[in-house]
Image (cartoon, rainbow, N blue to C red):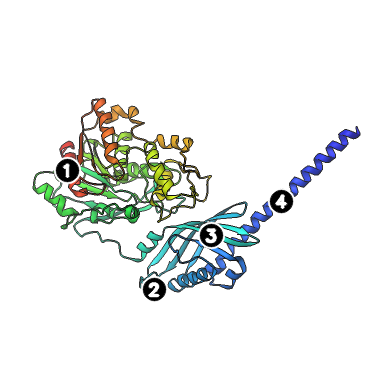
Amino acid sequence: MYSQIRNISIACIILVALGGFFQTASADIEANKALVLRLLEIFNQGNLAVADEILATDFVNNDPSRPDVTDIESYKGWVVENRTAFPDFHVEIHYMVAEGDKVAARWTVTGTHQGEFMGIPPTGRQMTVTGMNIHRLAGGKIAEAWWAYDALGMVQQLTDPLPVPDDLVKDQITSPSLEGSLLGDPAMRNMVIYLPPGYETSDKGYPVVYLMPGLGATERWWACGEFSSFFSPLGIAVQNLPEAGFASMTDGLIADGKMQPMIIVMPDMSTAYGGSFCVNSALNGNHEDYIINDIVPYIDANYRTLPSRNSRGIAGHCMGGYAAMYLTMRHPDVFGAVASHSGTLMTAGLLPGMQPIAAAENPEGLTLMGPDPAKPWTSMLYLFSAAFSPNLDNPPFYVDIPFDENVQIREDVAQRWAAYDLLQIFPDHVSDLASLRGIYLDAGDKDELNEQLIAQAFSEALSAAGIEHQLEIFDGAHMDNLYTQLAVSLSYLSDALGD
């Protein structure tokens, strides 16, 4: 009896001790979060004295967009710079996650551009930027900070984007499928539309081609040659937009009899991480539904189209090439013909090739600190993962990267990517592809991403299934001959689509 009482007493003491430990740990976490919240006094109120109170004397700041901001003094100078350029500079923290000695936060910054900023004279424009950061705490102070935010988007908001030419139509849609994005991506999306000569005076209906942009691109990519800086560190060449413009090029194809009069719709596929691949994602939003359920019905309702899959095609480059083929395989009732330019048709199959490149960018191991302009291939992992392996239980970036800290392939994540690999799911869509009126593939023989090998593999699968198609391997790299090849595919789609 005494032994039982003694054992119960010991158990109670252990439980009390553990309860005290967890209470202390919880209190420490809440104290850490409260300390990070005091940063709002610095940024929103301009109280620089708080920086000296809460930042450690050896504080280290890691911001790839501002490599000059490294310690307390440059950090305070950065605050002054921001608040001078944006007198109403305001940070709103949406949520915070804390574990151990680290606190991660998701936030939005707003402000009105009233002073010079990064060499840009004041414009009076409103600026909105979303981002995330991680703070490490030590000794009751913030010892280190890491930042990830859309610095390119911030600059673009303060500078004029390439204007859409007057011979193209600018339109806009609010997509129910994209509302409530965790990354803060807008549901209101722009699109650029080409209308063929005679459209305004005719009462006839026209076939439609949906033209999807590449990685990191908006609706202006094809329309006016706006090229994202996403690939710039990789040394990939810029586009070759004809000097006379997109509309002049397509008008010329019609005049030469190489293309029937068609409507061409160029939608926005951009996201905070650079692109959506037009798949439904818990993180990016439902971009597949955005195209199929929102944009296509809107175009049919507001423009004189021939609203039939036999008169509706889709094309795209790189990510857009994937999107075109993916949407067609899944919705052959919507699209009757498809063209993929240098399409990233493999997903899981890319991992062995991406592995040594990711390792070279991260020689000390892959630490998940968010997209980094200095590491374009690592940043690409976030873009792909946001589409193929999102994880809302994995803050602050909400993705599962397919490599571990030693840059070894994570098989569990690779399997999730495989579910979107068009070669792997090909057998499930043979009848869908066979029902199409036309399939076009191309890639350059010097493609930096080896897309020519992917195009050839997909072509072999089509041939083995007895499905007619056209494959072109041209002389050039990933971004070479872009509009030259587009002219070829538009002519091909024109022949395939009904009039």
Q: Is residue 334 among what the camera can see?
A: no
Sequence-wise first label, 2 or 4: 4
Label 3: few (<14), some (14–19) or many (≥20) C-alpha neighbours in 10 Å: some
Q: How crowded is mark 2: few (under 14 residues within 10 Å), some or many (20 or more)?
A: some
Q: Residues within 10 Å of mark 1 (few under 14, many from 20)?
A: some
Q: Which is nearer the N-term, disc 1 or disc 3?
A: 3
Q: Specify the label residue 261 is tagged with.
A: none
Q: Mark 3 points at which residue?
A: 145
Residue that mark 1 sits on: 488
Query: Tag 4 or tag 3, which sits nearer the N-term?
Result: 4
Label 2 vs 1, first from the N-terminus: 2
Horizontal side of 366 relative to 483 (left or right) equals right
Q: Is mark 1 on a helix, strand or loop?
A: helix
From the viewer's side, name the closer residue of 52 and 358.
358
Q: Name the residue under label 2.
A: 116
Callout 3 secondary element: strand
x 77%, y 47%: residue: 17
Which amino acid type corresponds to the residue marked 3 in the rendered image?
Ala
Return the x and y of residue 218 as percentages of the image width and height. Answer: 31, 53
Residue sitting at the far left:
256
x, y percentage for residue 170?
A: 26, 56
**3D distance between C-alphas at marks 2 and 1:** 46 Å
Q: What residue type is labelled 4?
A: Gln
Q: The residue under label 2 is which amino acid type?
A: Glu
